[in-house]
């Protein structure tokens, strides 16, 4: 079996999973895999992620220009391409709207409380990116302060994006974010959170070295994450330097 066919089958498999887990509704969400240095294989827009076949996938170049496939690609592909450009170690991206995590993203609350030992080892803090309108360069620009240091980001009033060295790891991080959000919600309902001490957090970060799972780069601070100083306007300017997003928007067919 060719490597590309294997990736197409993985997109079908993990598309079904995100749908079954309720991370998306209707035709929401998009998943992608980096094929090589200039091509990305992505799920189609306007198709339920639970009902895709291998032939539904779209191949685009690093500017989002369609190269292969009968479907259109989502305008949110720009967010995936920004991550691939900024993180050469990343080979797959998953963007969904999981209910609880999106609830936190819509309440304006980052998932950065050091209350779960497993989360500190596998995921680290999940920052909240500033709101950016979907289908515009604002969405990619909102991610810029976080892409280098985190592998999972909450998109304000929208959803989540996670990424990893494989589609399996990118997917598992979405699962972990939603699971962490559910635990956070329970602590809010109980009216109490007991944070781990800095010494215990350090021990867990050390333990990452021997952990073979979906490791993340992200740290877990003792206090809440600091907001990056750059604002959305400045990030938009920076984005233009990283990614010729105008090309993406011009070449994409809605
Ligand atoms: Zn979305």
Image (spheres, grey):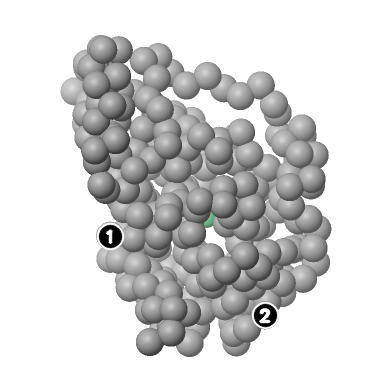
Other residues around mark 2 within 10 Å, as few (<14) / some (14–19) / many (≥20)? few
Q: Quadrant of the C terminus?
A: bottom right
Image quadrant in which you'd find residue 62: bottom right
Residue 225 drawn at (x, y percent): 47, 21
The outermost residue toward the left is: 190
Q: Quadrant of the N terminus?
A: bottom left
Q: Nearer the viewer, residue 42 or 89?
A: 89
Image quadrant in which you'd find residue 80: bottom right
- For image coordinates 64% across by 52% down, the residue present is 85
Counting residues from the start of the chain, the first of labels 2 and 1 encountered is 1
Residue that carries the numbered disc 2 in the rendered image:
67
Is there any visible trace of residue 235 in the rendered image? yes
Residue that carries the numbered disc 1 in the rendered image:
21
Image quadrant in which you'd find residue 236: top right
Residue 25 drawn at (x, y percent): 40, 63
The answer to whether 154 is drawn above or below residue 253 in the figure is above
Gap in Å between the C-alphas at discs 2 and 1?
31 Å
Describe residue 172's horizontal placement relative to residue 42 as left or right: left
């Amino acid at each position: 079996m060719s490597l590309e066919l294997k990736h197409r089958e993985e997109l079908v498999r993990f598309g079904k999973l995100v749908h079954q887990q309720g991370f998306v509704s209707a035709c929401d969400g998009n998943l992608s895999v980096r094929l090589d240095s200039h091509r990305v294989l992505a799920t189609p827009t306007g198709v339920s992620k639970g009902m895709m076949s291998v032939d539904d996938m779209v191949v685009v170049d690093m500017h989002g220009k369609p190269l292969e496939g009968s479907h259109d690609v989502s305008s949110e592909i720009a967010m995936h391409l920004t991550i691939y450009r900024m993180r050469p170690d990343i080979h797959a991206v998953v963007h969904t709207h999981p209910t609880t995590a999106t609830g936190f993203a819509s309440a304006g609350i980052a998932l950065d409380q050091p209350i779960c030992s497993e989360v500190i080892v596998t995921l680290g803090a999940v920052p909240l990116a500033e709101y950016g309108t979907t289908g515009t360069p604002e969405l990619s620009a909102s991610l810029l302060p976080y892409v280098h240091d985190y592998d999972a980001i909450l998109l304000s009033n929208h959803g989540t994006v996670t990424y990893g060295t494989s589609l399996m790891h990118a997917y598992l991080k979405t699962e972990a974010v939603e699971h962490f959000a559910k635990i956070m919600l329970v602590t809010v309902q109980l009216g109490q959170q007991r944070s781990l001490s800095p010494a215990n957090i350090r021990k867990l970060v050390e333990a990452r070295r021997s952990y073979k799972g979906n490791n993340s780069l992200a740290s877990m601070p003792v206090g809440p994450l600091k907001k990056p100083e750059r604002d959305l306007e400045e990030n938009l300017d920076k984005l233009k330097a990283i990614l010729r997003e105008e090309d993406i928007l011009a070449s994409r067919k809605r």
